[in-house]
Image (cartoon, helix red, strand yellow):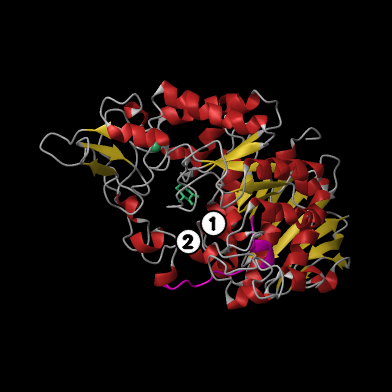
Amino acid sequence: MADAAWWQRGVIYQIYPRSFMDSDGDGVGDLPGILARLDHLTWLGVDAIWLSPVYPSPMADSGYDVADYRDIDPLFGTLDDLDRLVAAAHDRGLRVLLDWVPNHTSDQHPWFRASRASRDDPKRDWYIWRDPRPGGGPPSNWLDYAGESAWRWDGRTGQYYYRVFLDAQPDLNWRNPEVQAAMFDTLRFWLRRGVDGFRIDVLSLLVEDDRLRDNPPNPDYRPGEDWPFMRELSVWNVDRPETRELAGRMREVVDEFGDDRVLLAELVLPLEQTVAYYGADGRGIQVPFNFELLTAAWEARGIAGYIGRYLAALPAGGWPNWVLGNHDTPRVASRVGPAQARVAAMLLLTLPGTPILYQGDELGLGDVAIPPEQAVDPIARLIPGRGRDPERTPIPWDGGPGAGFTGGRPWLPVGDANRRRHVAAQRDDPGSMLTLHRRLLRLRRGTPALVTGGYAPIGSDGDLLAYLRTAPGGDRCMVALNLGPRPARLALPGPEATGRVALSTHPDRDGAAVASPLELRGDEGVVVSLG
Ligand code: NOJ
Ligand code: MG
């Protein structure tokens, strides 16, 4: 894999722009803020940044409701700011990916305003308008995010329109070639500006069955535990063959700009369906997100089993990827606890494939409880307990009043516990979470076995999760992760059965020679260079 692409070697860092860095004191992060912190990111050692949406938006869904795909919302800055950011990132060897939201627009997008104005409008067919079914009621039984009908009645023109998220996020009609052409052109608009690729929002929802067939009920639905829409099996409105074909067309568009632009895609599908998006002969999405670690039970056998199943399911040439956190999921430090969050970081950064790191996870930030009356995320109201504000709170940069994030009042509270986890305090602390990330990133970069090497599981029991990574030249390292609080031991492989601790989650033994059996403390993970 000497010719591996940058996005195969690299680590992608997700920036949630509202919460990264505020430059103008309005309490909301912005592009000049990101620019001002780029040196921090190169110091940390990531290779690319993906920005959650920064397009003009009424912010009904924090920017995932786009009103113009070719501009920047004034809240975040200007097109010039974006150009400056891309140039400055490239100067530092960092790539820049934008979020692209093709499934739906804002209801304030001029396309939808025209579409909804009259049945004869040329844009009418750009969205999905249907009459009630015979006898009345929504045209199909398809459900939205919150478990209600995904069809919304619009009295003005007497038809339903289809939308999976908020009323303010109508689904585009991707069967319409004009929609395809217009949306593909929005990709070209940014690619021409030098953007290195996109993360595609909810790609799996792009196209729906043209006969509007009803979904069957889901016999395994667990009320209260599963998302409400999981009450039915979304076979007719999710992951349609037309969507897979369009994914290939998106890839052709980015390939017009050379072979080092990349597409990441959010799919939220079972494994077999997710990997179909790599496309025939790898002509599809290069990074169909692998979300397993976001929800997996923190248990060594289960995770080891999943790693094996995932790698086995990849098509020839399909490159793996791993996502540990994002702006839609409780923070990893809150899911597994602070001690295991260090082990989780080592897992993310030593598994084969591209790691995607969510801003703030490198600081060990936890979820911030947001009282219902302060909730910004509409999901907090629609599905109590599922609000996503807790994982979207501002990055604490220093111990100052606005945590170094803002000179004003942050749009969400920083949170007392997170406030103490600020960058300035962690930067020079050898035991900090930030230092662990920086060292893992540096180790990874300098260790071909970890970047492009092969993967082989090491059988073990209890809470141990262990594997070998082997470089093409033969250099090997062993990763041994103790997912539990009790000490554990593991034989070192090979005839020599000796090695050196390249890095431990407990920094007191870095560089130490080790012999078999390797002793691990509770909650400890180590990378051992063998031989
Ligand atoms: C997935 C995004 O990650 C989430 O934040 C958003 O609410 C939905 N898609 C709708 O765009
Ligand atoms: Mg759709």
Do residues under tags 2 and 1 come within 8 Å of each other at their CB atoms? yes
Q: Which residue is mark 1?
A: 327
Q: Earlier in the sequence, mark 2 or mark 1?
A: 1
Report the image quarter containing ligand 2.
top left
Q: Is residue 309 magenta?
A: no
In the rendered image, which quarter is residue 72 located in? Answer: top right
Residue 333 screen position, x and y as percent:
60, 68
User: Hey, what amino acid is under mark 2?
Assistant: Arg
- Residue 410 sits above or below residue 254 on the image: below
Q: Which residues are magenta?
A: 358-371
Residue 363 screen position, x and y as percent:
68, 66
For residue 518, which numbered disc appears in the image?
none
Element under disc 2: loop
Residue at 50%, 56% in the rendered image: 328
Along the line of sight, the residue nearer the viewer: 89 or 42: 89
- Residue labelled 1 has its Cβ within 8 Å of some atom of ligand 1: yes
Q: Residue furthest left?
A: 135
Along the line of sight, the residue nearer the viewer: 29 or 531: 29
Along the line of sight, the residue nearer the viewer: 54 or 317: 54
- Residue 231 sits above or below residue 524 on the image: above
Q: Residues within 10 Å of mark 2 (few under 14, many from 20)?
A: many
Q: Main secondary structure of the magenta part?
A: loop
Q: Which residue is mark 2?
A: 388
Residue 430 screen position, x and y as percent:
81, 71
- Residue labelled 2 has its Cβ within 8 Å of some atom of ligand 1: yes
Residue 482 in sight = no
Residue 304 in sight = yes
- Residue 462 sits above or below residue 486 on the image: above
